[in-house]
Amino acid sequence: MSLTILLFVLLGLSALAFYLGRQRAVMAVGGELRRLHSLPSYHGAYVAIWCSVPALLTIVVWAVLESHVADFLVVGDLPESYTGMPADAKGLLLNDIHNLANGLNTGGNIKPAVQAAADNLVRYRAIATAALTIVALAVAFLGLLYARRRITSAFHARDAVERALSILLIISSTVAIFTTIGIVLSLLFESIRFFAKVPIYDFLFGLQWSPQTAIRADQVGATGSFGAIPLFVGTLLVTVIAMLVAAPIGLMSAIYLSEYASPRLRAITKPVLEVLAGVPTVVYGFFAAITVTPMLREVGAGIGLDVASESALAAGLVMGIMIIPFVSSLSDDVINAVPQTMRDGSLALGATPSETIKRVVLPAALPGVVAAILLAISRAIGETMIVVMAAGLAANMTANPLQAVTTVTVQIVTLLVGDQEFDSAKTLAAFALGLVLLLVTLALNVVALRVVRRYREIYE
Amino acid sequence: MAQGGDQIETLGQEVRVTFKLDERRLRHRHAAETRFRFYGLLGIALAVLALGVLLVTIVAKGHTAFFQSRVVVDVFFDPALIDPEASGDPKILAKGNYGAIAKRSLSALFPEVSGRRDKRALTRLLSDGAARELRGMVITNPGLIGSSQTRSLLVSDDVDMLRKGHISRDIPETQRALSDKQLAWLDALAEEGRLKSSFALGFFTSGDSREPELAGIGSATMGSLWTILTCLLLSVPLGVMTAVYLEEFAARNRWTDLIEVNINNLAAVPSIVFGLLGLAVFLNVFGMPRSAPLVGGMVLALMTLPTVIIASRAALMSVPPSTRDAALSVGASPMQVVLHHVLPLAMPGIMTGTIIGMARALGETAPLLMIGMVAFIVDVPDGPLDPATALPVQIYIWADSPERGFVEKTSAAIMVLLAFLILMNTSAVLIRQRFEKRW
C-alpha cells in the first residue's frame, strides 16, 4: 500500500474513531448529555487523537529509519570484494544502486552484484512498506480501542483534548527555533568542512576567486583558489549603487507622501509602490538583462564609454528600483510617527514646511530612517536573482560600475546549481559564503534594531 | 512728543530695513521649499516611471507570445504512412510517420521545388510540433486515416519570429535565420492567405521544450501549484498555531522571547539561505528527492512562516479583550474562547496575511534553484513528488536561452506570473475590505 493511501485510510479510521467515541459517550449516559463531563464531540476527538497521532508518529519514525536500514542491509549483502571500499566509492556505489532500484538508467554496463543489490533494495522496500502498513494500522486500532475503553460519563475528555491541542501549539511554535538551528548548524557544519580544506584566512582575505576542483589530483591548477574578497567587493559595489538609487528616491517619496501629498495622490501612489515591492525578483532580473543593460550599452557607446554586457551598474540600478518601496514604506512609518505638535511648533515659528521637515521632522525620525536604510542594505546584499541574471560571473576586483562583477549570492547559485559532488571544496564553499551572508544580514538587522532602540526619542 | 514721534519713525525705518532683507531671504526660502517639493515629486515620479517602464516592456515583448503563426495546408492522412495494415491499434497509430505527412502536405503546395536541399529547406519551415499535432488528430479520430483534410500546422520559430517582425529581411542572407528562398516561399504562402495567427493554446498546456514554438508553461504552472499547495498546507497551520500560542497562551518569559527573536530573525534571513537549508537538511540529511515540489514547498513554508505568524498575531491582537472576557465569563475554557470566538474573528486578517505570504512564495526563485527545481521538465508533474520546476524558475531558465523566440516566451510567462500575483493580492485586499472588522 502506498503512503498516500495509508494516510487516507488513517484519516478514514480517525473519522470512524471520532464517531465511535462520540457514540460511546452518548451511550455511557443513556442519552442524558447533562451527565457527561465533556460534550460528546470532545470524547470523539479524544478517541480520534489516540487513533491517529501514535500511528502518524510510527509512520514518521519509520520513514526516517527505513532508508538507512535498507541501505545498511543492502551494503551488508554485497559480496566480499565491495566491503573494503573507501567511503566515497561506497557512496557512489550506493547512489548507483538507488538509481537502478528507482528504474533510472545509470548508463554503462551494470555489474551483476550491483544489479542484485538493487533488486534486494527493491525487495526490502516492498517488505518495509508492507510491514509499515500493518504496524501503523495496528497502532491505530490499539489506540482507538484503548481510548474508547476509557470513556465514561465522568471522563474529562475536554481537558485531555485541550491538553493535546496546547502541546500541538507549543510544538508548532518551536518550528521557528528549529529552523534557525537548522540553518545555523547546516551552514556551520559544511563551512567547517570547507575550512578544513581551505584555510579560513585564505577564504576571508584571499584576492583570487576561481573555484575549480580537479578531477584528477595531478591536474594543473588542481587546487583552485577560494579568496572571497572579489565577491565581497562585487557585492559591496552593487549594493552601493542600489542604495544610491533607492535611498534618495525612497526617502524623498516617503517625505512627499507623508508631508505634502493630498489624500488622493497618496491613495494612488502607495499601491503603486506596493506593486513595485510585489514584483518577483526574477522579473527584475529579466528586466535588467533585457532592457536596462542594452540601454546602458547604447548610452555608454554614445558618450564613448565601454559598458560590459553584464555590468554592476545595470544590476545595481534595477536592484535599487526593487528596494525603493522597502525604504519608502519603512521611512513613511517613521515619519508619520513624529508627533504633529512638533511640526505645528516649527511652522508657528515661521519655518517653511521644507525647513520643518529638514530641521525638525527628519532629525526626530533619523534613527528610524537609518534603520530602514540598514534593513534595505541587508535586503540588497541577500538579493539573488537580479545579480544572477544581470551582474555576471567574472570575479573582478573593481570599483568600476561599468564592468562585470560577481556577488556572494551569484556564486552560491553558480556553485550549487547543476550536478555536483557534495564533498568537493567547490560545493562546500557555497555554504561558507552562505554563512558569511547570514552573519552579515543578521548583524545589519541587529544593528538596525539597536539604532532604533538606542536613539529613538520617546514622545508622550 | 516730537522726540517720541522721531523714535517711532526711526523704529519704523528700522523695521522697514530689516523687512527688505527678509524679503530676499524669504524668496530664497520659498525657492528652497519649491525645490524640495519638486524633489519629492521627482522621487515618486521616478518610482512610478520605473514600474511603468518595467510593465510596458514586459507586455510589449510578451503579448505576441499568446498568438502563434500557423500554415494552412491540405493534409492527406496516408494510410501507408500511419497504419499500413489497417489494424486500428492505437499503439501502431501512435508510431506512424506523421513527420513525413506534414512535410508532404507542405511540399505539395510547391511542386516546383526539387532537389534534396531545397526540399529540406522548405520543410524546415514547419515546426517539429506539426507532426505531433497530426498524431493527436489521428489518435482522437482514427477515421481521418485515408482522408484529405484542410488543417493548419504549426510553423517553426524562425517563421513565427519573421512574421512578428523580430527577424529583419534587410540583413544579409548568410546572417539571417531564413534564406532568400525560404522568404520567397513564405511570401507565396502569405499571398495565398495560408499563413495565419491563432491563439497559442500550447503555451499554457505544454511543458518546456528546446524549440521555442513548442515550449509552454504548463508543467511549470503545475509545479508551482504543487509547491504552493505544500507551502500553504504547512505554513498556515504552523503559523496560525504559533501565533495563537504566543498571543493567547504563552506567558511572557525567556522562552517566548527566544521564539519571538527567532521569528524576527528568520524574517530577515535572505531567501537563498533557506535554499541552502533545504539542500543540506532536506536533501542531504533526510534524503528527500531532488527537484520535488514537496521539498520546494517545505523550504518556502519555512521562508513564509514569519510572514504568516506576524500577520496572524496582528489579527489576533486586534480582537478586543472584551470578546474573550465575555466568553470566559459564561464558562468557556481558554481553548474554547480561542477556537470558538477569537480565531473566527481574526480569520480575515489571517487570510489576508497568508495570501500575501503565498504571493511572495509564488514569485520566489532562488531557494528553488538550490534544491534542484531548475530542470528541463517536459512532462506535467502529477504530484508533489514528481520532478518539477516552478513558474519563476521557468522564467529564469528561458531568460538564459539564446533563441530569439524565448524572449517573447519569457515575457509572456512573466505576464502570467504577474497576473497570478495581482489576482492573489487583489483578493487579499478585497477580503480585508469586506470582512475585516474594526473595533
Image: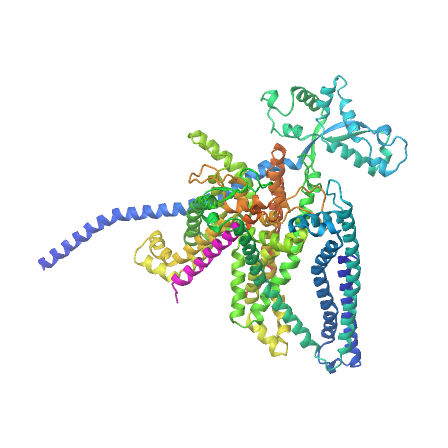
Q: Is residue A451 above or below residue B74?
A: below
**Image quadrant in which the C terminus of chain B is located:** bottom right
**Image quadrant in which the N terminus of chain B is located:** bottom left
Q: Is residue A286 above or below residue A86?
A: above
Q: Main secondary structure of the magenta part?
A: helix
Tell me which colouring the rendered structure shows. Answer: rainbow
Drawn side of residue B149 relative to residue A290, left or right: right
Picture quadrant where residue A42 is located: bottom right
Q: Is residue B60 magenta?
A: no
Residue B393 at x, y percent in the picture: 62, 44
Residue B434 at x, y percent in the picture: 60, 59
What stretch of residues is rendered in magenta? A432-460
Pick the residue in front: A163 or A291: A163
Residue B305 at x, y percent in the picture: 59, 59
Residue B227 at x, y percent in the picture: 66, 52
Count of marks overlaid on the render: 0
Q: Is residue A446 magenta?
A: yes
Picture quadrant where residue B428 is located: bottom right
State whether residue A42 appears in this view: yes
Q: Is residue B160 above or below residue A159?
A: above
Drawn side of residue B267 relative to residue B2, left or right: right
Pick the residue in front: B159 or A425: A425
Pick the residue in front: B231 or A106: A106
State whether residue A280 appears in this view: no
Pick the residue in front: B175 or B150: B175
Drawn side of residue B432 relative to residue A359, left or right: right
